[in-house]
Amino acid sequence: MRANERIMLLEDAQALMADAISKIRSAVEDTSEERSAGAYIIPHLENWTYGNNPYDDTAIPKLISGIRKERDEEDA
């Protein structure tokens, strides 16, 4: 699989994760589970989706960045 295909798959996954976050947020709104989801599940998913935590190397944007770097090094 080419690097660009890998990046596209990760970008698709990122969009699906964003949709999942929105659905989870809506599903728990005004329920007893809202506090727990808002404190744990949603922040973790947001971090993996958007890379909000600069100390965490497991986010999708960092995976994309790593693949781009490998691609660029191979092309050089």
Image: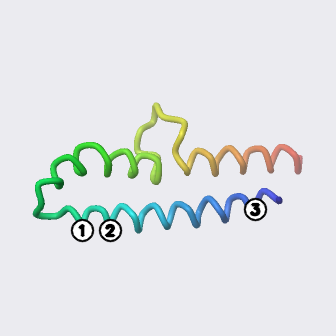
Number of the front mark, 3 or 2? 2
Quarter of the image where the N terminus is located: bottom right
Q: Does dot 2 land on a helix, a strand or a loop?
A: helix
Residue type at tag 2: Lys
**Residue indicated by mark 2:** 23
Whole-percent x, y for residue 23 in the image: 32, 68
Location of residue 30 (image quadrant): bottom left
Are the residues tagged 3 and 2 within 8 Å (C-beta)? no
Numbered badge on residue 4: 3
Please indicate whether residue 35 sits to the left or right of residue 46 in the image: left
Whole-percent x, y for residue 18 in the image: 42, 63
Q: Residue furthest top?
A: 55
Q: Name the residue rendered at 45%, 52% in the picture.
A: 50
Q: CA distance from mark 2 to mark 1?
A: 5 Å
Give neighbour class at mark 1: few <14, some 14-19, many 20+ (Cα, 10 Å): few
Q: Earlier in the sequence, mark 3 or mark 2?
A: 3
Q: Name the residue rendered at 30%, 62% in the picture.
A: 24
Are the residues tagged 1 and 3 within 8 Å (C-beta)? no
Are the residues tagged 2 and 1 within 8 Å (C-beta)? yes
Q: CA distance from mark 1 to mark 3?
A: 33 Å
Please indicate whether residue 47 sits to the left or right of residue 12 in the image: left
Q: Nearer the viewer, residue 11 or 20?
A: 20
**Residue indicated by mark 1:** 26
